[in-house]
Image (cartoon, helix red, strand yellow):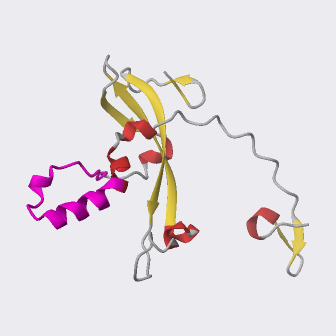
Amino acid sequence: MTFCNGDAYAYNDQAASLVQTQFQYITESIEDGPLVSTGLVCEPDKTATVIYEYVLELEEEANVVGGEWVGESMKAHPDFLWVPQPIDDDQVTKNQSVRQERARVAQPVDRWLQPLSSSARPPPPPPPPSPPSPEPCLLFNDAFLHSFDFMHCW
C-alpha cells in the first residue's frame, strides 16, 4: 500500500487501505427549540464538517481487524463514536401507542444504522500546487504587509 506522496506505508505491514471519511455533525446551539423541523439545522453555523484519515487493517474476508489514524487525524479525532443499534419493540414497552410512535420516529433513523464503512471512500487526489505568494502592498502608514495576511490588494 502506498501513502500520500507515493512512499510505501512502512509502519504497518497489515495495512490494506488508506481511508478518508467526511463526517458532518450538528454543532452546539444557543437557540432554544427544534433545529431540524424548523430547517435551522441547515444554516452554515449549525453544522460542521471534518475529514478523518486512517489506515485500515483487513483480514482475508475484508473484515476490519484494526487500523490507525494518519495525517492531521492523529491529533484531532473522536475518542469514540456512538451508533444507535436496532432493538426489539418488546425490549422497549408493551404500550401499543408508544410502539407506534417509536416506529414512526425510527424510520428516518434507519439509514444511520447502516455500517459506517459504507460511507468510506478513497482519499481525493492531492491538491494542485499553491500559487506564489502575492506581492506586498503598501498599507497603513507606509508599513509593508503581505496581502494574504490581512486583505487582498486589488
Picture quadrant where residue 153 is located: bottom right
Q: Residue 146: in sight, yes or no?
A: no
x and y, in percent, of residue 26 in the image:
44, 64
Picture quadrant where residue 116 is located: top left
Residue at position x 38%, y 25% in the image: 12
Residue pushed farthest top?
A: 60
Q: Is residue 27 above or below residue 72?
A: below
Q: Foreground residue, 101 or 119? A: 101
Residue 90 shown in magenta: yes
- Position of 52 compared to 101: left or right? right
x and y, in percent, of residue 33 in the image:
40, 81
Q: Foreground residue, 102 or 32? A: 102
x and y, in percent, of residue 68 in the image:
37, 37
Q: Is residue 135 above or below residue 71?
A: below
Picture quadrant where residue 34 is located: bottom left
Residue at position x 44%, y 23% in the image: 10
Residue at position x 26%, y 57% in the image: 103
Q: Foreground residue, 68 or 87? A: 87
Q: Foreground residue, 59 or 46? A: 46
Q: Is residue 86 above or below residue 5?
A: below
The C terminus: image quadrant: bottom right
Across the whole image, how many numbered discs are drawn on residues?
0
State the extent of the magenta-drawn residues as a range. Answer: 80-107
- Position of 4 compared to 58: left or right? right
Q: Residue 5: in sight, yes or no?
A: yes
Residue at position x 53%, y 33% in the image: 122
- Position of 8 compared to 134: left or right? left
Q: Is residue 112 above or below residue 18?
A: below
- Position of 57 compared to 152: left or right? left
Residue 93 shown in magenta: yes
